[in-house]
Amino acid sequence: MIKGVVVDGLTAYAKNVSTGRFQEEVNLDVYLSGVKGEESLLYIKVFHGRKPYYRPWVEFYGISGNIKLETGLIEYFDSILEHELLSLFSQFMGPGGNIFVEYYNDEETSRQLERGFPPPVTRLGYRLFKLGFTWFKDWYFPEGFMEGGQKLQGEKPMNEEVRNRHLKETYVEAAAFLKKWEPLGINEKYIARAVERAKRILS
């Protein structure tokens, strides 16, 4: 991130790097730049873990959904930029690794989770599911002011047995969702998109 990640002619990079609350924690202030100028994109907090007690995790928060650069308005959610950043961090997370992604500015994910959709059929949840995260928790009501806004947690399975159990649970959830919501999603895009994801999961 210090060197920068180039996507479609834009560079996302960590402009400021600082130590967090613990020696294993690092804070990244991520900016997006084009030909000229830069804008704040998001913040990333990385916890490297503390064996044998705590496993590594990463958190994406303070996400700017739309970034205005000289090339125009850049949309972050559901973009190749979002995919590349999530992929970059997820590939270094081993069994039991967790990711937390704030979603309150992500309209589609917010509406789907508010309706009680299973996380893997939501926009963000499906993206994390495809990156190997198989267990999810919706932190829709943070317990204090230190946790930040609403966020979706994804966890990678500890082993193949756990992975298979998670996938079976996801299959059951997706099938139940499809039965209930498919007839209602004809004219509403966020339902229709979730229905399509559920079908892909079942296949």
Image (cartoon, rainbow, N blue to C red):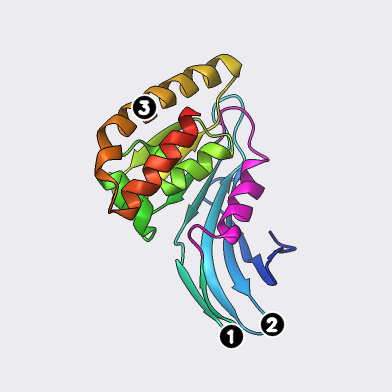
Q: Where 200 sits versus 40, above or below? A: above
Residue name at image x 50 percent, y 57 percent: 78
Which mark lies nearer to you, 3 or 2? Answer: 3
Find the residue positioned furthest to the top: 161
For the record, the magenta segment spans 76-97
Q: Is residue 91 magenta?
A: yes
Q: Nearer the viewer, residue 53 or 68?
A: 68
Q: Secondary structure at mark 2?
A: loop
Which one is earlier in the sequence, the residue at label 1 or at label 2? 2
**Mark pair 1, 2: CA separation:** 8 Å
Q: Residue 91, how many percent across, how many down? A: 67, 41
Location of residue 39 (image quadrant): bottom right
Residue name at image x 35 percent, y 47 percent: 192
Is the residue marked by circle 3 packed among few (<14), some (14-19), or many (20+) residues within 10 Å?
A: some
Q: Secondary structure at mark 1?
A: loop
Disc 1 to disc 2: CB gap under 8 Å: yes
Q: Nearer the viewer, residue 23 or 35?
A: 35
Which one is earlier in the sequence, the residue at label 1 or at label 3? 1
Residue occupied by mark 2: 35
Residue occupied by mark 3: 175
